[in-house]
Image (spheres, rainbow, N blue to C red):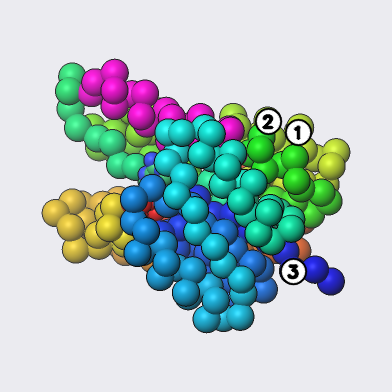
């Protein structure tokens, strides 16, 4: 049987890199996108290849729809197919409500909403039965326990409608769409020893951060055969932050 192929956006670091490594370990070939971190992207590709999978990386700023479509084309041209899209690339935009600029607003919506729609639209053209779209949201889309995150929470909550709509649009073709909501996860975006970490930990039920591998494990379940009858769902991997 041909190896399945995944495209993971923002795979150069953090959660996206963990997802790329995990899907490769599970037997998929993996393409990743990144914005700037070419050397980090190369490290992820090396890790993917180290477990016997094929890997490729392509620069595709999430604010550039043509580059996103190009990333899908690149993966299909390189590996001959596309089975799994993971919309993971994201940015932390936060601060006092009054300080949010129109530029901030446009960028957050471009990265967290428009890019995910554009990529899903381009990717599913290549998918058949067993295809998967997995969006990475945030626990802040479900519950906002502190001020300063209105724009981020709003942008991530749009993925709920995207996921449910895709589940209905794509169900007849045997393609699933799901949403994974990480809670505080130890990455460069949100280090477990950062200035806000102790407060964030206190919002969890388990009194701990998630690791990128925790998020990757749930993505892998949804991407694999175990996820065949899960669609339109939102799954929190947040150590109980939204409990
Ligand atoms: P990191 O900041 O560690 O990594 C972000 C990744 O996204 C990098 O690969 C980066 O590429 C890429 N990226 C950022 N902006 C763009 C862009 N404009 N175009 C293309 N790629 C881009 O973040 P995390 O791993 O922590 O976060 C991954 C996802 O999980 C995000 O959607 C985030 O919102 C979400 N999340 C994270 C949480 C956390 O606590 N860490 C909690 C809840 C949700 P490059 O390396 O080139 O910059």
In the picture of the structure, the residue carrying the numbered disc 3 is 3
- Label 2 crowd (10 A; few <14 / some 14-19 / many >=20): some
Q: Is residue 161 above or below residue 51?
A: above
- State yes or no: discs 1 and 2 in contact (Cβ < 8 Å): yes
Secondary structure of the residue carrying numbered label 1: helix
Q: Which residues are magenta?
A: 100-119
Residue 84 picture quarter: bottom right
Q: Is residue 104 magenta?
A: yes
Residue at x-position 72% and y-position 64%: 4
Mark 1 vs mark 3, foreground winner is: 3
In the picture of the structure, the residue carrying the numbered disc 2 is 165
Assign the N terminus to one quadrant of the image: bottom right
Residue at x-position 45% and y-position 39%: 62
Image coordinates of residue 50 in percent, x first then y, are: 52, 81
Image coordinates of residue 174 in percent, x first then y, are: 83, 47
Secondary structure of the residue carrying numbered label 3: loop
């Amino acid at each position: 049987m041909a190896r399945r192929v995944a495209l993971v956006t923002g795979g150069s670091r953090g959660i996206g890199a963990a997802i790329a490594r995990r899907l490769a370990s599970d037997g998929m070939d993996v393409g990743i996108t990144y914005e700037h971190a070419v050397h980090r992207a190369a490290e992820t590709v090396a890790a993917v290849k180290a477990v016997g999978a094929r890997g490729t990386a392509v620069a595709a700023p999430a604010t550039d729809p043509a580059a996103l479509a190009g990333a899908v084309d690149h993966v299909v041209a390189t590996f001959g197919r596309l089975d799994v899209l993971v919309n993971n690339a994201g940015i932390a935009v936060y601060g006092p409500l009054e300080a949010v600029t129109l530029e901030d607003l446009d960028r957050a919506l471009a990265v967290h909403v428009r890019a995910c729609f554009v990529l899903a639209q381009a990717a599913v053209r290549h998918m058949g039965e067993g295809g998967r779209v997995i969006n990475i949201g945030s626990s802040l889309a479900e519950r906002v326990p502190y001020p300063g995150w209105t724009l981020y929470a709003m942008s991530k909550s749009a993925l709920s409608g995207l996921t449910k709509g895709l589940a209905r649009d794509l169900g007849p073709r045997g393609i699933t769409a799901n949403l994974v909501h990480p809670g505080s996860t130890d990455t460069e975006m949100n280090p477990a020893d950062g200035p806000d970490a102790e407060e964030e930990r206190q919002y969890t039920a388990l009194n701990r951060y998630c690791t990128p591998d925790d998020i990757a494990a749930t993505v892998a379940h949804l991407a694999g055969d175990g996820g065949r009858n899960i669609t339109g769902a939102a799954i929190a991997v947040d150590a109980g932050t939204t409990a």
